[in-house]
Amino acid sequence: MIFIVYSMIGWLWESFFCSFKAKHFVYRGFLLGPYCPVYGFGVLSVLLLVPKEYGTLLNLYFNIVVIVTIVEYVTSFLLEKLFSMELWDYKEVPLNIHGRVAVPVSIFWGVGCLFLIKVIHPEIEKLIGFLNAETNGWLPLILFVLFGLDALTTFIFTMTTKKEVEHLVDTSDSENAVIKEYRLKHLFINAEESLSRQSILSHLKTKKPHLKHRNLQRIVKNYPNFKLKK
């Protein structure tokens, strides 16, 4: 239940800030539903792995930074290996590791998670306890089933649609993006538009309306750092 709740909170966070910066609604998230699982995994990992006797707040903060950095790196690695996609790229952020994680970004997420653990999470626990009691424990099961179906559907859609458009990827195009996004401050910097990105979006517009095509079109449009690798 904690995983689902924070995945949805993460989706709200990203959608709100990206919409604010883009000046139009941006439906974030790799899945069809309103989830950003990296947030759910990140918060759950922090809650499970941070030592109970963490000592000072500085020690707690250091533990959080290490955990969220590992989670973000692993998530980026799996997205690339399983789906041949990159949804963020920190190569132009100082002190980055393979563009998957960067020290300034990890510092930012560390501050956010520290605030979450000390201030927000106690209230979230109360809410989860209340909802479990009111639904006799059925709500977590229902949410996990819906999430599982969403993840499976997204995987199938992504694999089938990727085969349709991967021939459109220009292998000489190093940055398949219109703009680059620094998630640290959600700053948008205009850059030369990618031919691969133009080709993929043009191809998707010619297809008959189908949820799988709409989902990939949404990802390409809403993720400035989107890359589809051959």
Image (cartoon, helix red, strand yellow):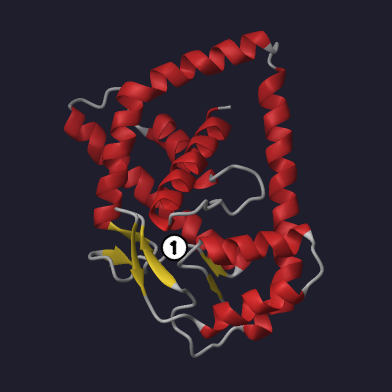
Task: Tell me: 139 left or right of 172.
Answer: right
Residue ID for mark 1: 88
Task: Tell me: 188 left or right of 145.
Answer: left
Task: Tell me: 28 left or right of 69.
Answer: right
Task: Tell me: 220 left or right of 137.
Answer: left
Residue, x 30% and y 23% (percent of image)?
A: 118
Residue, x 70% and y 57% (percent of image)?
A: 155
Residue, x 30% and y 50% (percent of image)?
A: 106
Residue, x 41% and y 49% (percent of image)?
A: 20
- The quadrant of the picture occupied by the N terminus is top right
Name the secondary structure under disc 1. Answer: loop
Whether 174 is drawn above or below 68: the answer is: below
Residue 18 at x, y percent in the picture: 43, 52
Residue furthest to the bottom: 172
Whether 117 is drawn above or below 175: the answer is: above
Whether 196 is drawn above or below 205: the answer is: below
Residue furthest to the front: 23
Residue 190 at x, y percent in the picture: 36, 73
